[in-house]
Amino acid sequence: MCPICAADKNELDWMRAACIYDDASKNVMLPFKHASALKYRDLMSRAMIASLRELDTEIDVIMPVPLSWRRLFKRGYNQAALLARPIARHLHAPIDTASVRRKHRPDMGHKNYRARVDNIRGVFTVSRPGNIRGKTILLVDDVMTTGATFSELRRTLKKSGAKAVYGIVFCRVVKAI
């Protein structure tokens, strides 16, 4: 578990990462995300499922972090959705895509936290609030860098009536102190 997750210092009601972002995880995550190396999905999802062992509440809805239609078209798949499927099977919870990206934004690759927050603000909307109202949601993604995307999704989902918003990622960027 990453040090930030262990200290519960995050924007979500609960958050876990299977590992920290380092050379080993980068060499799995980046090809999976950008080079169609889908062979890594099972390894990544198994590690994420193992990180869920501390989860002490029932998840009502699994929600992959949505991609913009442009990025989905370019990549051909949503890596978060691919990771969400085995997690949903493991937790016996449905996958829902009630949250959608309504705006395309530039890639956040090398932006700092403040720029990421500004870039992602207002990007998400909930198309079917009845699907999440009063529910505990588990957001799934491949990597968390600053947490700006998760924070914005949490704000949007809570505003639409979600009871709690949890998160799971394969790896998390941890800056040296």
Image (tube, rainbow, N blue to C red):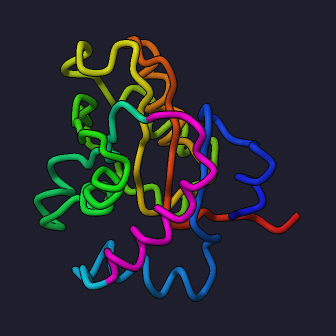
Q: Is residue 70 left or right of residue 45?
A: left
In this picture, which residue range is highlighted in magenta? 40-58
Q: Is residue 89 above or below residue 134?
A: below
Give the main secondary structure of the magenta stretch.
Answer: helix
Report the number of discs: 0
Query: Residue placed farthest to the right in the image?
Result: 177
Q: Quadrant of the N terminus?
A: bottom right
Magenta span contains residue 156? no
**Residue 16 x %, y %:** 60, 53
At x 17%, y 57%, the residue is 72
Q: Is residue 53 left or right of residue 78?
A: right
**Residue 29 x %, y %:** 43, 76
**Residue 67 x %, y %:** 26, 49
At x 11%, y 59%, the residue is 73
Q: Is residue 115 above or below residue 73?
A: above
| Quarter residue 83 falls in | bottom left
At x 52%, y 37%, the residue is 166
Q: Quadrant of the C terminus?
A: bottom right
**Residue 173 x %, y %:** 63, 64
| Quarter residue 171 falls in | bottom right
Magenta span contains residue 42? yes
At x 49%, y 58%, the residue is 169
